Amino acid sequence: HSCARRGDEAVPRRPAQAGLRSLRAAGQGHLRGLRHRERPVTEASLIRVTRRDYERAIRVPSEFMAKFCKHQATAYEAWVKAKSLKDFSLVQPYLEKTLDLSRELACFFPHKHIADPLIDFVDEGMTVSILRPLFRELRQKLLPIVEAITSGPPVDDLYLHQYYPKEQQLKFGRTVIERIGFDFQRGRQDETPHPFTSSFSIGDVRITTRVYEDNCTEALFSTVHEVGHALYEQGIALELEGTPLAEGTSSGIHESQSRLWENMVGRSRGFWECFYPQLQGIFLKQLSCISVSEFYQAVNKVVKSPIRTDADEVTYNLHVMIRFDLELAMLEGKLAVCDLPEAWNERYKKDLGIVPTNDSEGVMQDVHWYGEMIGGMFQGYTLGNLIAAQIYETAVKSNPEITVAIERGNFTLLHQWLKHNIYQHGRKYTANELIDRVTGKPLSIDPFIRYIHNKYSDIYSVKLALVA
């Protein structure tokens, strides 16, 4: 059982290579420990998931996968060079071949839209017919909110970019994630150039952290993000270990857990009411004159940026939806790869009012299309934000003491609620089944818009549009 994430990139799950019969047999021993009422549901899920993985794997010829994987490695190297030289033309022919191979891969599966199988690899049950109207509505709601916030005076966050020694940042971060619930007896934390989470088993889940000494929050928030992934993996029921059910159910659900902890908890006022005195005590020289309210505003600053990974939670989904729409246009044959940089820049100007200064800052900023494929690469990030808001809203409604506990530095109530409702099930339920089971409703943009409205109306003292 292995689940890797390259930084913020959720790596698509590869089709299982073992046969249906052998995989089912491998899991039967683990299922004997389940309570009698749970066993039929779990066994049915095991059969469904194993059959899905197996049938998906055998549809794709091994010769094709070998060719595609070899090309991915070559295209990635071309992207590294092209990005460093800020020259898209160097990687364009490789991306054109990636597009051809992505279409060919999709054609091994029945589909209504060419992108559907590619999306389904990582977000089972999601299709273009579901996502396109969902994202269109979200974009329509977000654009006026972004304009209302960014048209006012900017929040001062210069004091976040002083000298903050690495060791002190790491020590503070470890204190935070231990309080949140990361189990160091079943995991570890190391440093890497880019943060990621790797799960080798339920009992061995590892996170990595990147520290900038001129930024006192980058390391903390990226670490809390990865811990969100890790808590999910550590919280899967032990009885599922060794079966195909012992991992997250989809890219969107996995991302929802990291975004929930990073943003809805880690960037909340209650979180900083608890932890800011400790952080201020560690970095007294840098933060002695900064109040908790000022700090809270700074870590939630909204700004139009050309870089997705630097984006705040208000503008972030606009970045994702730009990529999603461009992916579909390429797969549909409506956008040629040679025209991609121009289309990218036009969409950024339209949605965010900015144009990247070069293609490295623009169309080549993400590795996904160059190291993986075109199709299904980005929707999981926005799905994660939407699902996180819907789940968190449900959790707080079911137990209002959760927010009070967070203000006191007690995360047990939320952690246990998530473990009971999300983590323990692994892949037992599809994402859509899980959302409906936990929240009682299908996926909606409304909880996310309510969350953004309530939080940022307060931070920026502006009147924002709100859905019913």
Image (cartoon, helix red, strand yellow):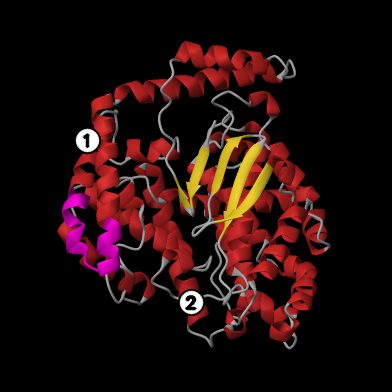
Q: Residue at x 31, y 51 (%)?
A: 369
**Position in image of residue 442 (x %, y %):** 55, 42
Q: Quadrant of residue 59?
A: top left
Residue under circle 2?
303
Measured Cα–Cα span from mark 1 to mark 2: 39 Å
Question: Mark 2 Cα within 10 Å, few/some/many (few <14, many 20+)?
Answer: some
State the SS at label 1: helix
**Position in image of residue 289 (x %, y %):** 73, 88
Let me know if residue 229 appears in the view: no
Look at the image and give the residue range highlighted in magenta. 79-96
Residue 332 sits inside the magenta stretch = no
Q: Residue at x 18, y 56 (%)?
A: 92
Residue 93 sits inside the magenta stretch = yes
State the SS at label 2: loop
**Position in image of residue 201 (x %, y %):** 61, 33
Name the amino acid type tagged 2: Val
Q: Quadrant of the C terminus?
A: bottom right
Q: Is 63 displayed left or right of 192 in the figure?
A: left
Instruction: Count how many numbered circles sit on residues in the image.
Output: 2
> 118 or 466, which is in the foreground?
118
For marks 1 and 2 on the same chain, the one whose residue lies earlier in the sequence: 1
Find residue 104 and name its label: 1
Name the amino acid type tagged 1: Glu
**Position in image of residue 321 (x %, y %):** 38, 58
